[in-house]
Structure formats: structure tokens, C-alpha cells
Image (cartoon, coloured by chain):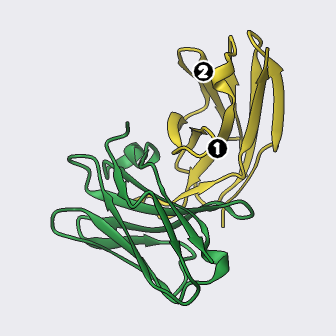
Chain colours: A green, B yellow
Amino acid sequence: DSGVTQTPKHLITATGQRVTLRCSPRSGDLSVYWYQQSLDQGLQFLIQYYNGEERAKGNILERFSAQQFPDLHSELNLSSLELGDSALYFCASSVAKGSSYNEQFFGPGTRLTVL
Amino acid sequence: GQSLEQPSEVTAVEGAIVQINCTYQTSGFYGLSWYQQHDGGAPTFLSYNALDGLEETGRFSSFLSRSDSYGYLLLQELQMKDSASYFCAVRDRPGNTGKLIFGQGTTLQVKP
């Protein structure tokens, strides 16, 4: 158990819908990351938040947005869903300091299926 | 940008030693990490090399050569539970973020 929690575990929805994925980082970690894992694209970085502020961005679609709240939990919002958005979405957290960025603790993931 | 190359599949027998290679191209280098992921599970951090040489953690070791832009993960005394996917990853610029770029992963199958 990494100490990172994600809900829900599974999500099935239809094209065009909007969903929200939730993540709670390990106690004390200020940085939260979101990754998308699909069969054809592998593990792709989406976005990082540090203590409530956006720190880094990957190739995140404009239909996707995220935020980190004062209690450090984070939410990833996916809208106008398409079939290709079906994937595993992982949240990770780490201590935000030097080499500790390389040791990220991943949550169990949310499996999103868009029908 | 950053890119990483690693073999897609490796097969070995229980008790053997296996090496998973990773070559990378980066515009800035902030260390090479390795993660393990069992089928359907979360990636788990294994090791990190910032400097050249070998880092050992139990049955697993990781090596880095910055001049060759190359690293490898060495797994010794293979066990069935080591069957998993292994990813190498580098951190993208700038150095003060945790944006990890992952290789496509190597699926290790350990046979009895």
C-alpha cells in the first residue's frame, strides 16, 4: 500500500459525458501527479500540482483539467469524453525536493471505460 | 524532448539473472529511475541512479552510464513473483518538477 488513495476504482460512462477522478496523496506529500496509461500510449504524464499550484504540464488535452485543494487532495476532470479516453488513470505523490521527485508513490488507479 | 528505448519482452527461468536495458535521449538529465508494475496494478518505485555506477537493493541492482546515455536493471535469483512490466523513466526539464517520461516498458516473464 503506497498510501495514495484514488476513487473510484472503476468508472463506466458514455461518450460526451464528464467525470471526476479523485486522489488523496500520502501524508506530508505536497506534490501530486496524474498519469494516463493506455495500451498504445504507455504511461503518460498529464499534470503536476505542488501545494495547490500547477507545476508542470504534459500533453494534457484541453478537455481535461485538474486542481489541488487546500487539504492537498486533487481531482482530475475529464469532459466531452471520447472512446479513446478509455484508460487507467493513476495519481502519484512525492516529496517535492531534488532527487525525491524521481521516487513517486502511485495510487491503485481508476479504470475508465467510455462506451 | 526526451525518449527512452527498452526491449518489449524478456523471458527467463526461475533462479536465473536477467538484465533489462534502457537507452535514453534527453535535453537535460536528472537521473534514471526504474519502476515495476504487475498486471493491472500500480507502478512501484524500484531504484534511482543520478551518478554513474551500480546501485544495489537486495536482489535488484541498477546501473547508469551517463556518457553512453544507458542504464540497466539487473534482477538476480529470479522468482515467479518478478513476472511484471519494468519501466525506466527520466525526469523532464526543468529540474524542479516531477514530470517523469517513461519508456514503453519491458514485460518480464519468469518461467519455472
Vertical comparison of A99 with B78: above or below: below
Q: Quadrant of residue A71?
A: bottom left
From the top left corner, tell me how far across and down residue A29 is, in percent: 26, 50
Q: Which mark is residue B60?
A: 2
- The chain letter for the residue carrying disc 2 is B
Q: How many tags in the picture?
A: 2
The residue lying at 29 percent from left, 53 percent from top is A25
Q: Nearer the viewer, residue B18 or B50?
A: B18
Same subunit under labels 1 and 2? Answer: yes
Label 1, on which residue? B88
Q: Quadrant of residue A76?
A: bottom left
Asked whether the viewer can see residue B68, the reply is no
- The chain letter for the residue carrying disc 1 is B
Residue type, mark 1 in image? Cys
Residue type, mark 2 in image? Phe
Crowd around label 1: few <14 · some 14–19 · many ≥20 (10 Å)? many
Horizontal arrangement in the rendering, residue B7 relative to residue B51 (left or right) = right
Q: Are marks 1 and 2 in contact (CB under 8 Å)?
A: no
Vertical comparison of B72 with A29: above or below: above
Q: Nearer the viewer, residue B30 or A104?
A: A104
The residue lying at 72 percent from left, 60 percent from top is A39
From the top left corner, tell me how far across and down residue B27 is, in percent: 63, 62
Q: Earlier in the sequence, mark 1 or mark 2?
A: 2
Q: Nearer the viewer, residue A99 or A63?
A: A63
